[in-house]
Image (cartoon, coloured by chain):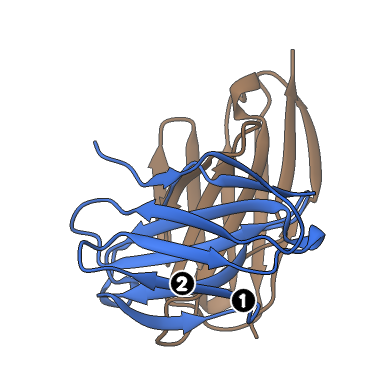
Chain colours: A brown, B blue
Amino acid sequence: GIQVEQSPPDLILQEGANSTLRCNFSDSVNNLQWFHQNPWGQLINLFYIPSGTKQNGRLSATTVATERYSLLYISSSQTTDSGVYFCAVLTGGGNKLTFGTGTQLKVEL
Amino acid sequence: AAGVIQSPRHLIKEKRETATLKCYPIPRHDTVYWYQQGPGQDPQFLISFYEKMQSDKGSIPDRFSAQQFSDYHSELNMSSLELGDSALYFCASSLDPRTGNAPLHFGNGTRLTVT
């Protein structure tokens, strides 16, 4: 099956710093999404982005499908950004969304 | 806006018991998914339904079964529980992802503890 690798696995930032999270996938995808899992375990959908660039406030994402990667940018990070960020991809004609390995982010004061 | 509703939030069972988890998708969403997330792990796909029919199956043990009912709610039935089944179980819903813009929306999960 498809392999979805994220980097870095762990990241510690000072509040106000910017960061870039990367998601690499091993096969063509027709659906890519980014999620944030907060410290209480809730999974929040950040972006549906099979290709191109989208922005939502301090977050933006870019997917380059032909090169099989996606990037999530976090600007002016806040402590509430802490948690795990997952990318997830859908391949073929099914409904199985495969999650990546995640990036654990901690934003400190 | 209405979200995905899961119940119960927490469940404690003993080994070899059975458990039933319930999920109520967002209205008009025709696809429902179940995921299992162990401690420190990424969510693992179990099973999905499209228009009340099973559409995809992942690493779901034979001891587990699921169905989607006429009102679109779904239930995950787990029998002969084992210690290793302790995990956070998520339900998610979306429009049919094969037709375009269809982000998944997750419920708050059911934390199952098997003792």
Q: Are marks 2 and 1 in contact (CB under 8 Å)?
A: yes
From the image, tell me which residue sits under label 1.
Answer: B60
Quadrant of the rendered structure where residue A84 is? top right
Above or below A83: residue B67: below
Percent x, y of residue B99: 26, 75
Residue drawn at x 61%, y 38% as measured from the top left? A41
Tell me the crowding category of disc 2: few under 14, some 14 to 19, or many 20 or more residues within 10 angstroms, Cα based: many
Percent coordinates x, y for residue A57 in the rendering: 41, 31
Q: Residue at x 24, y 36 (%)?
A: B1
The quadrant in which the N terminus of chain A is found is bottom right
Q: Which residue is mark 2?
A: B66
Q: Tell me if residue A81 comes above or below residue B46 in the rendering.
A: above
Judge from the rendering whether residue B38 lies leftward or rightward of residue A54; answer left or right.
Answer: right
Q: B73 or A59: nearer the eye?
A: B73
For numbered disc 2, what is the local secondary structure?
Answer: strand
Q: Dot 1: few (<14), some (14–19), or many (≥20) neighbours within 10 Å?
A: some
- Mark 2 or 1 closer to N-term? 1
Q: Quadrant of the C terminus of chain A?
A: top right
Using the image as rendered, state which of residue B91 and residue B22 is in the foreground. B22
Q: Residue at x 80, y 49 (%)?
A: B115
SS class of the residue under badge 1?
loop
